[in-house]
Amino acid sequence: MRPAGHRRHWVRLDNASNIFLAAHSEVDTKVFRLGAELDHEVDPALLQEALEATLERFPLYRAVLRRGVFWYYLQESDLRPVVVPETEHPCAPIYQADRRTLLFRVVHHRRRVGLEVFHALSDGTGALWFLTALLDAYVRRRFPAADQPPPAPERPDPAPEEAVHTLTTDSFVQHFRRRTRRAGRAGAPRETDHEEFLREAAPAVLTVERAPAAPPGQAPHRPAPSPPGRSAPEPTGRDAAAPPRRVHRVRGTRTPDHRPRVLELSMPVAPVLALAREEGVAMSMYLTAVLFEALRRTGAGGRAAPTLAASVPVNLRQFFPSSSARNFFATLTVAHTYGAGDDALGAVARRLQEDFRAGAAPAALAQRVRRLLRLERAPLARIVPRPLKDLLLGQINRANNRGLTVALSNLGRVTLPEPAASHVGRMQFQVSAARPQFCAISHAGHLTITFTSPFVETDHVREFARLLTAEGVEVTLAASRTTEAELAAVGR
Amino acid sequence: MRRCPDCRLAVEGEWARCPLCTAPLTGESAPSPLPAVPLRFTRRRVLRVLTLTSLAVIGLSFLAQLLFDADRESIGALRSIWLGVVATWLVVLVAAGKRRNLAKFVVYLVALAGGVCVYWDYLTGWDAWSLTYVVPILCASSLVGLMITVRVIRMPVGDHVVYTGLTVLLGLTPLVFLALGWVGTAIPSALCGALSLVVLAALLTMRGGAVRHELATRLHL
Ligand SMILES: [Zn+2]
């Protein structure tokens, strides 16, 4: 219990995270899930112990969300999280106004552990830090050994998003990252609980600015080196350019109780990587092109609007080191119009990669960060009352959705610390979906691509899987039961 | 693991047909890593529809009351019964909606019940009984009720100061009625106002820090 008279610490929610509150609904709950499959049935008691230990180190996850007149704010709480067997559908709603609950949950089913997070609290990378610490704590308890390596550092290096990594190996950025990390952590006196909460909960973009020797956007100003043989386009912000023409939007039958349709494809990562390399593109963009091709085959290309557009988030921590666990990413849009040139898979992938490279160029990203900073400080954004802000952001979100066919997110290759690494096999990553979407993550040589969709139709996933198996990739499918008929057939 | 010959992939779980293409699967089944979660009957959605319909009916029936002539005695009695029923139902709805935050519920209750009574008074020819008796009694008793509630359920100060403050403000309004000469008998309004002032003074002297902190949090620009 807290001493009498103790004031709970609080931090206002940044503008970037506000969009998740304005846009969350029963269908699109703005919840995402990170999971790991262990080599044994999960022990709930030990998982609970591990969760409590992990929570000690991640004060942000103790926060509840409250509503002020002008802002939502995160406030520390004494709530204790309890691990639960998985009885709800994935990405079920977490935040409910007026009900003060933690903004995450930990579930387990058979050999799997799942961490579900309300997106306003953190993004995939931030949640991965938490899950990594949780798995580390759990496996240490489950397999106690005398010669255990020391506990993992609190903030493991963000997994390099393979796509961006291959594009920008800017040594200055690498150097800059190392410096600030050392300055930020090693040798620094132990923070009090209070400071720790405020640091973790601070809007990420503001912590970048406070970082030593890091004026915003200055570090990664040098343009990305272009791979030999191909010329890099001018690094202008993608969204600054004219928005793509009317894009195709997938429609279908909604699931009976708003649960997302979840289809999980797992496969060895090496052959997929080889396929992407063959076409000279990053894996993310290769998979996006495969998805576009799958959509085209299911009829998208034949209609009046043959332009397909996908949104791709980019983790900004790679370029702008921040110790905040809050949302810190930029969303880029890549698009392809069928019937206006070379529509071969490889050509589409290369076109998408060019789109992506333009948006992910350090200069363009620096511009984004500056815009985020301006937004964070905009006087107008401050004095607008919260309900009105929600309304405006909801409209913006709807407008954005109109320009997208699909969304995808790749957390890249995860490296867990030992001993967790040797007891965890496949990992999972999925997001609630307002439109067909896939999330990818790889660990221990397994690539898992989880499709989520608000519709029951599976055509595009079927074509996607067939495109991969036709190339000789060994794909395994795990599907959650969604329709009445599927659920009635359980065990039969 | 079962296999789909058409999609050429392995399928985990006990599926008889391929979840992607409905072709019959071959081979032995392996347990699914995903649970089969039964369909939710969305009670929440049903409740919301019921609440919204009720609110619409209440609003319309309040409006309809304006159409009747206030002078006719028979309608006056019927109207009072109807207004009483509808007002009770409104209070039930608000109580159900705000059950998770008792302090907030009190504020809603006072504002809604007070408003309904003033409207009722207006419909029945404006004797000012609502301003003279109902509003002061409602405010004063809510304030007492709230004080007891937060003590009994040990509600943290930060969670109720804002709503207690709002209840106090509502409790001060009868003083305004008194000053404007809108009330017949002064005693209920004077008592309610005095009680509100006492609570306000207590709140500011004993919980001044908490009040300031909470206001700073919620009004933070
Ligand atoms: Zn099949």
Image (tube, grey):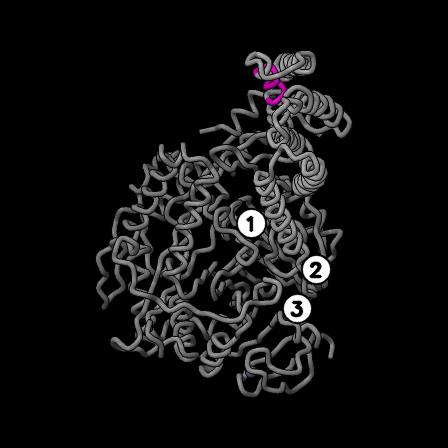
Quadrant location, the C terminus of chain B: top left
> What is the quadrant of the N terminus of chain B in the image?
bottom right
**Residue type highlighted by circle 1:** Phe
Instruction: Return the residue found at the far front.
Output: B72
Q: Which residues are magenta?
A: B170-176
Circle 3: is it few (<14), some (14-19), or many (20+) Cα within 10 Å?
some
Question: Which residue bears the numbered disc 2?
Answer: A87
Distance from the alpha carbon under mark 2 to that under mark 1: 18 Å
From the image, state whether disc 2 or disc 3 is nearer to you: 2
Q: Amino acid at mark 2?
A: Thr
Quarter where residue A60 is shown: top right
| Crowding near the residue tagged with mark 1, few <14, some 14–19, many ≥20 C-alpha atoms within 10 Å | many
| Left or right placement of residue A60 versus residue B188 in this view | left
Q: Secondary structure at mark 3?
A: loop
Closer to the observer: label 1 or label 3? 1
Q: Is A490 placed left or right of A25 in the picture?
A: right
Q: Residue at x 53, y 74 (%)?
A: A457
The residue marked by circle 1 belongs to what chain?
A
* Residues at circles 2 and 1 in contact by the CB criterion of under 8 Å: no
Q: Give left or right: position of B37 versus A447.
A: right
Q: Position of residue B49 (x, y in %)?
A: 62, 53
Residue A118, numbered label: 1
- Which residue is at 59% across, 83% downward? B22
Ligand 1 visible in quadrant: bottom right
Q: Secondary structure under badge 2?
A: loop
Q: Which mark is residue B33?
A: 3
The amino acid pointed to by label 3 is Pro
Q: Secondary structure at mark 1?
A: strand
Identify the main secondary structure in magenta.
Answer: helix
Q: Chain of mark 2?
A: A
Number of numbered markers: 3
